[in-house]
Image (cartoon, grey):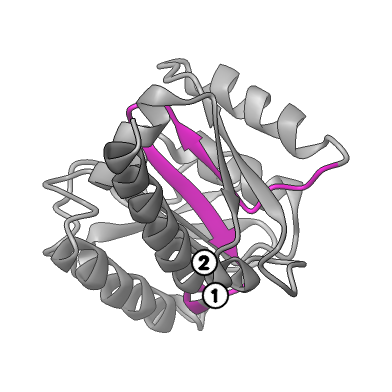
Amino acid sequence: MDPQFPKLNALADDLIASCNLFHARGWVPATGGNFSARLDDRHLLITASGVHKGELTRADFMIVDTDGQPLESGRKSSYETGLHTQLYRFAPDIGAVLHVHSVANTVLSRQQKAIRLSGYELLKILPGITEPAVTVEIPVFGNDQDIAQLARQVDARMREPTSIPAYLIAGHGLYTWGRTVREARYRLEALEFMFECELWSNRRNP
């Protein structure tokens, strides 16, 4: 345990457990996906670049500051670190950010500019929702390889009056977050279930 970050090992273990679950469900094939958790006001733990998410160990994580700069030289964090740091800077209560590549979210995000979810009981897991008779819109952003530009687009959307619990990148995957790793995982699992329902519904009713 690093005395500067007493929560480091526990957070790494929480993220590893989540990654094992996601990999078993086929949501993080090969080295796809990236995961992080807040260590303090200025630092986060994040998966290193190029590691297999179904085989993670504590050594596969690294510490970066909220500008995305690694504390340890010679290591490279995920290419999409800037999308994580945007969220941590935007909302101090965000404690974890999870990103997966499921079949359902990849297919839907290639077909639609936003995913509208309504009538699902699991919507109540998302923040601020107390009953399922609402419509939640999950925005879809273009798959821009300029991560700084993409982060600015996300930031602008999050500053609009209607809050969002997650977003998609077209053909690329889902980003969601929570105050803890567990809360973020619950939200991700709920969203992935609803995305799969939407995908099946689209196939039955083209």
Residue 10, image x, y percentages = 41, 84
Q: Secondary structure at mark 1?
A: helix
In the rendered structure, which amino acid carries the disc numbered 1?
Answer: Glu
Q: Residue at x 24, y 72 (%)?
A: 21
Is the Cβ of the residue at disc 2 closer than 8 Å to that at disc 1? yes
Q: Amino acid at mark 2?
A: Arg
**Residue designated by label 1:** 183
Residue identified by numbered label 2:
187
Tell me the quarter of the picture where residue 116 sits.
top right
Q: On the rendered image, what quadrant is the C terminus found in? A: top left
Q: Quadrant of the N terminus?
A: bottom left
Q: Is residue 49 left or right of residue 120?
A: left
Q: Is residue 171 magenta?
A: yes
Mark 2 and mark 1: Cα distance apart in space: 6 Å
* Crowd tier of the residue under label 2, counting other residues whose Cα lies within 10 Å: few below 14, some 14–19, many 20 or above: many
Magenta part of the chain: 162-182
Residue 73 occupies which quadrant of the picture?
Answer: top left
SS state under label 2: helix
